[in-house]
Image (spheres, rainbow, N blue to C red):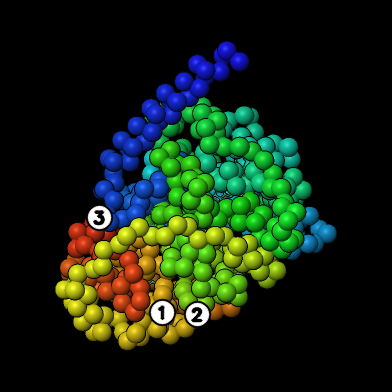
Amino acid sequence: MGSRAPTIALCVALATFVAACATENYRQYSPPVPEGADNSGGGAIGLPRANSDYGTEDVAAWGPPSAAAFPPDAGDQYSADPVARGRYLAVAGDCRSCHTNPGGQDFAGARPIRTPFGIIYSANITPDPKTGIGQWTEADFYRALHKGIAHGGKNLYPVFPYTYFTRMSRADVDAVWTYLQTLAPTYQVKPRNQLPFPLNIRFVLKLWNALFFKPGEFRSNPAMSAEWNRGAYIVWGPGHCGACHTRKNFLGADRNSHALQGGTLDNWVALDLTGDPRRGLADWSPGDIVEYLGSGRNARAAASGSMQEVVYESTSRMSDSDLAAIATYLKTLPPRGRPKGMRPPSEAAMRAGQAIYVDTCAACHGQNGEGQPRYFPPLAGDTAVQANDPTTTLRIILEGSRSVPTPAKPSTPAMPMFANKLSDEEVASVATYVRNAWGNAAPEVSAHSSAKMRHKVMTRTNLPSER
Ligand code: HEC
Ligand code: HEC
Ligand code: HEC
């Protein structure tokens, strides 16, 4: 007992040191958060966060391959064949997307993943004995997913979402293992992570785990239906939805009191998934959720940003019953508290914004923001537009966007970029307008925020016009 106090003191001291260094490094290459941005959450050590992609142009950007390249059969959760089950769970866990470098071999890793602290490369999880997991045992693999510890005992960075995979059952993890064993072994060395001292020392992760991580498989709640429990298992286990949809604390761990209420990463806002009436899914029926996850679009919204990759690689290949289970679970999440008193936008900004809207946007999004369902998303009542943090709205206006193709909806309606057509004042006022017209409400956007987002967008090399 007596030896615990010094250990805890050491942990706290080191954690503070890590935080200080991390913040320092973050500042070196990231401009401050745009004004008015609700960005108090961080990114996990490892999880990308708003602004974090600034200045790391060499990092690969994901874009959906052509619809024709859609890979085969996702497997089946209820198959007696563990390989088919494992393949399905690997889809639910989105393993392939992080573990495949665009242009590289599936599951051979080496994909650079941006974090606020530096770049972490995914590992080779093909059965190659030298560079993959060929020398691992099934027990090693379970320990990696359950505890974040690799073969040989080194701790893994939580950008690998073991903080969620820990909730997967042993049988499910074993099935994924069995599936990965069937892949062709690929020789692919994992590049060195680009992290500053002391984050490059994996020992630091032991402290992080001691502070923020409790391993444990999912336990179902007997008071709820089997479908609800299945949904909760996917959301909190293999699906790791909270990795993006939950804000982080200053050391990059999930803020559990804000679970699934939305987070910001990589210049996208991962929206509130609770029943919040304005920002969340209160108005969405379970069918709306299933349609969105299954096809990337529904009458209310179209998936942009990192959600496109999730839809493409993972949710659009899940079974309808699993999507229905996710919807059942999400529909029981209570709304967060009332939004803080919000000042209405200035009339001048609204008038200027309206004029621009009618000229440049209404042809697609409708005079009253009603959109064209499943083609041009409605902006009236839209959750992305009304997020406190205007990151997504500004980014889409400046950079444009193209919908994700899925087998159910293979066309890809696009929005042009406006960075070259609208000034920062104009972008800010049209953003303010769409955030506050037709019953919408969200804080006014400043020209300053637009200028900052423009700088970030323009210094990236993967503008859609260049793809
Ligand atoms: C968000 C991105 C992401 C997702 C999703 C992801 N991984 Fe990873 N994974 C990583 C990264 C990054 C590393 C390397 C971490 C490090 O360097 O500590 C890693 C490491 C691993 C390792 C350790 C390998 C080694 O040689 O040390 C295993 C095993 C693994 N992942 C399996 C999986 C499986 C199975 C899934 C799907 C159920 C999955 N990962 C999903 C990013 C991801
Ligand atoms: C890699 C990060 C990431 C992960 C993992 C992720 N999401 Fe998302 N999600 C996003 C982003 C970003 C958006 C906002 C997309 C937009 O603005 O169009 C989003 C949007 C959504 C929306 C639409 C919300 C709205 O109001 O329009 C739903 C529903 C959703 N996600 C569900 C899920 C579920 C369920 C999971 C887990 C199976 C999940 N997401 C995992 C990043 C993620
Ligand atoms: C040519 C048609 C077109 C025009 C013009 C257009 N948009 Fe869009 N807009 C789209 C499409 C298509 C999407 C969906 C893109 C996607 O799925 O990523 C979209 C998405 C959006 C979104 C994100 C909605 C969400 O739920 O994620 C916002 C905000 C937006 N547009 C605002 C504007 C504003 C403001 C203008 C005028 C300055 C404008 N759009 C002009 C077609 C258009």
Front one among 43 and 279: 279
User: Which residue is the site of mark 1?
Assistant: 378
Q: Nearer the viewer, residue 199 or 211?
A: 211
Kind of residue sitting beneath label 3: Glu
Residue receiving disc 3 = 35
Q: How many marks?
A: 3
What residue lies at 61% left-to-right and 67% top-to-bottom?
327
Q: Is residue 129 above or below residue 13?
A: below
Q: In this image, 108 relative to 344: left or right?
A: right
Kind of residue sitting beneath label 2: Ala
**Helix, strand or loop at mark 3:** loop
Instruction: Give the image location of residue 14, x and y in percent.
Output: 43, 25
Q: Secondary structure at mark 1?
A: loop
Residue under circle 2? 299
Say what secondary structure mark 2 lies in: loop
Neighbour tally class for label 2: few under 14, some 14-19, many 20 plus, Cα within 10 Å: some
In the displayed structure image, the side of residue 221 where residue 420 appears, left or right? left
Residue most extreme to the top = 2
Q: Residue at x 23, y 80 (%)?
A: 354
Label 3 packing within 10 angstroms: few (<14), some (14-19), many (20+): some
